[in-house]
Amino acid sequence: MPPDSLSLDDQPDAAAAPASNSAALAALAAATTWSYRPGQPSAAEPAAWTAISLAGHGRIDAAANAADWLARLQQKSGAVGVSAEDDEPRWCTALAMLAWLAVDALGRSPRYAAAIERAATWALQDRGKTAARDPNVGHDTMLVGWSWAADTHSWLEPTCLFVLALCAAGHGDHPRVREGLRLVADRLLSEGGANFGNTTVLGQTLLPHLEPSGLAAFTLAAANTSSSPDESPPIERTLSYLDAEVQQAQSPVSLAYALLGLTAWERRPANAEQLIDAALAVGAASVAGGPSIHALALTSLARLPAAERFAELCRDRAKNGKSKPTAAVDAREELKAAS
């Protein structure tokens, strides 16, 4: 049964969607399997991005279908596995929280409040492993974030997702979230951008990639880490990297993450919609069955107004309770302490 929500007639954004996105939204709304590739079974990540994207474009009834499926995956502990068949790993708990929050933000009454609370309780107890500092490894291995799998090291991307989900759920001031933000800032490369894992190894700086760079930028913006990128050179260099590389992106998923990061910092390129259309065309030509639900969900989320709504959803609600200057000063002090 769908949540107490807006009806389709109440959803002006759906009707106003450009034609290129209308087809993607129709495919997402009609989906009953949310997968990484056509023909594969449902997985939690594409289901969550589908719910978040559809909610961002005002299609709350369709978004609730994917959100409800995620709720059925929730375990007694509060965690969510990667699929109906696999209870572990449980990093998708963060994405499920964001999906439920996105749907509840538009509904007339909260449907997933209990699920979100159980997931947040589990997330605040879960922690990635630390390791002794090693001069051959550039990042701070003592910082505690979140991991891809239980009992493994903290990594950038799961930490970003849990920081976003917990900030959106009102836990932005929790010490685990603040340390997670320090980890995200610590993983930025000195020349800008972020790698999937480390910063330097054996004295060699690793290469940045669009997906982790965009997600890190989006996370730091949503958490009110700085009122201006000029106040944090690593963030400004990361945005400059995204500014330049986003024009060359051909992977729909990587492009979507880059656009989300730039949009959150009000640096969205003027040709963003054309970039998405071009990337999806490349994907349609190279992938049997066309772009996956995963790719369609992320690229639709990267379009307006969904990208801006997602950034607003993830804003640190604890910081929002303070004046912006006060919040920015607090966060800058944390960044200085982490540097």
Image (cartoon, rainbow, N blue to C red):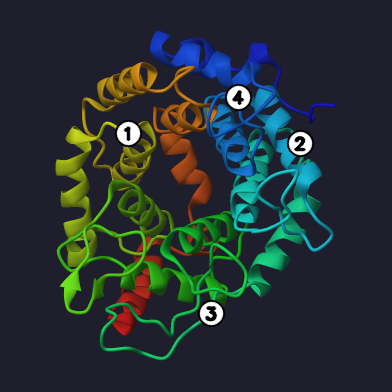
> In the image, residue 113 lies at what x, y percent?
76, 50
> In the image, residue 311 lies at what x, y percent?
44, 45
Mark 3 belongs to which amino acid?
Answer: Lys
Mark 4 or mark 2, which is nearer to you?
Answer: 4
Q: Are marks 3 and 1 in contact (CB under 8 Å)?
A: no
Sequence order check: which comes first, mark 3 or mark 1? 3
Residue 290: numbered disc: none
Q: CA distance from mark 2 to mark 1?
A: 29 Å
Q: Are marks 1 and 4 in contact (CB under 8 Å)?
A: no
Query: Disc 3 on helix, strand or loop?
Result: loop
Residue at the (73%, 27%) spot, across then down: 5
Q: CA distance from mark 3 to mark 4?
A: 36 Å
Residue 39: numbered disc: 4
> In the image, residue 95 lies at what x, y percent?
59, 49
- Residue highlighted by disc 3: 129
Residue 251: numbered disc: 1
Residue at the (54%, 34%) spot, across then down: 36
Q: CA distance from mark 1 to mark 4?
A: 20 Å
Residue 68: numbered disc: 2
Mark 3 or mark 2, which is nearer to you?
Answer: 3
Query: Disc 4 on helix, strand or loop?
Result: loop
Mark count: 4
Among the 4 quarters of the image, the one containing residue 339: bottom left
Sequence order check: which comes first, mark 3 or mark 4? 4
328 or 99: nearer the viewer: 99
Q: CA distance from mark 3 to mark 2?
A: 32 Å
Sequence order check: which comes first, mark 1 or mark 4? 4
Q: Are marks 4 and 2 in contact (CB under 8 Å)?
A: no
